[in-house]
Image: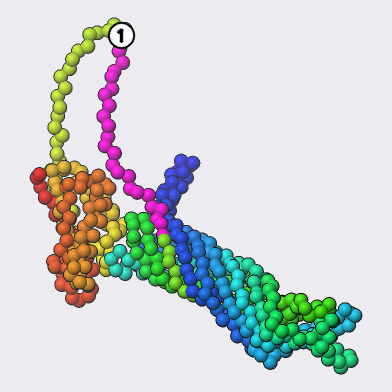
Amino acid sequence: MKIKITIALLVVLKVTTNAQELSVKINGGPSGILYDSSIGNGKLKFGGGIGIGYTYFFSDHWGISTGIDVTYNQNSFKLNDGNTINTYEIDDQTSAFEYRVTPSKYKEEQHFIAAAIPLLMQYRTAFISNAQWYFAFGGKMLFPGKQTVKASADQLQLSGYYPDLQLLIDDLPAHGFGQVTNWKDETKTSLDPTFLLSLETGLSFKIKEKTQLYTGIYVDYGLTNLAKETPDLNIVAYDPNGIANTQANGTIGNKRIVQDTRYLAAGVQLKLGFSLARDKPQPIEPKTETVIPKEETQVQEPPVQKKIVETVPVQKVLSVEERNYIEEKPLAFQEVGSTSVTPELASRLDEIAKILKSNQDTDLNITGHTCDIGTKARNLEIGLQRGQAVAEYLRNKGIESNRMHIFSKGESEPLVPNTPAENKPLNRRVSLILVDGK
């Protein structure tokens, strides 16, 4: 039982490793908080991020991705002039009053850093030669750090209204009431985690054997508010000891100022993907060892020299069935621009490799073909790449390079007419012809 479990785990590990990809990425674009305010206006500013990812492809087209991203986000927010922000406070004599702040040209510059954990489904398919279109969708969990707020105003009018006395005090600086000009201050505000809907799309290009370059665009949108609610805080703090050091509280948590705070990021991104697929091992030639029999007696006989007769290995003659298996049915590359050996082709090429190994005097002509989509020059190139892909697979299975001869006919020799369009996939193929004798 233990042996069966061990073998199963090894098989799963091998398949999983061949389907894995690690990636690093960088992106940039408008990134921050999308404000909804009845008395102000917020704007996204340029931000960006970096990330590392892991993708497991469970088929040729579909995979699932995760990882971790770190983003830098920026905003600006301006209050409309003519608004007064009211909260209730207690003065230095323990009397309750209505604290009124009337700003002029009030604005905030905001930024924060966040970490996100994505979980995305990814789809990919051939687009052109050596390029694929990809699309990813899913969600991310965003964990924001504290938001840094740099607030400023041309003028702050700080007033106190005592409803019991029907008294308004607006010029008593020693007790926190009066006018402040050219005011600036900085503070930090807390943000809540949020769940993001996420979309990515673009093209990927094969730049090395195991390296893909992804280029595209992305959008992330928050489903819940980022701001922690602080309805009892005014935009600046009341100080009963004076107005000289008036401190900022910020606007983001006050529901009377900002009604909705959703995360939004969009822009372009670049990503490098590194495949973890193992290289296929090269065939190892068997070694012959001479076995010296043990002496049956203690009497040492003089060595007898034996004449070694070398025998010429008998070559197997290919049968009609084996020839037909190789030559009659072309190798299908049905997707436009596809130059990769699919699992279905690999199964057949494994059998072809076994047949070729049985007769070392037989060479193989490998010819790539295409349909009529694209230019003639480009189709000649794709046909050659298809032939090279087949030859490379057979080479990894132990077939010598000097036995394989690669050609390309492009679109010039279709198997069937290219019209109707349903015929075109039949013309995207590689044909194999055996050549006897060296």
Residue 281: x and y in percent read 32, 45
Q: Looking at the rendering, which quadrant does residue 261 occupy?
A: bottom right
Residue 436: x and y in percent read 10, 47
* Numbered range of the magenta stretch: 273-295
Q: Nearer the viewer, residue 274 or 278?
A: 274
- Left or right, 76 with respect to 199, comes to right
Q: Nearer the viewer, residue 386 or 30?
A: 30
Is 357 rendered above or below residue 88? above
Residue for point 19% across, 12% down:
304
Residue 405: x and y in percent read 16, 52
Is 289 rendered above or below residue 171? above
Q: Give the crowd class for mark 1: few <14, some 14-19, many >=20 residues within 10 Å.
A: few
| Residue at which label 1 appears | 297
State whether residue 323 appears in this view: no
Indicate the secondary structure of the residue bearing disc 1. loop
Residue at the limit of the structure toward the left, as seen here:
437
Residue for point 31% across, 15% down:
294
Residue for point 57% across, 74% down:
74
Is 337 rendered above or below residue 41? above
Q: Is residue 143 magenta?
A: no
Q: Nearer the viewer, residue 4 or 166?
A: 166
State whether residue 378 appears in this view: yes
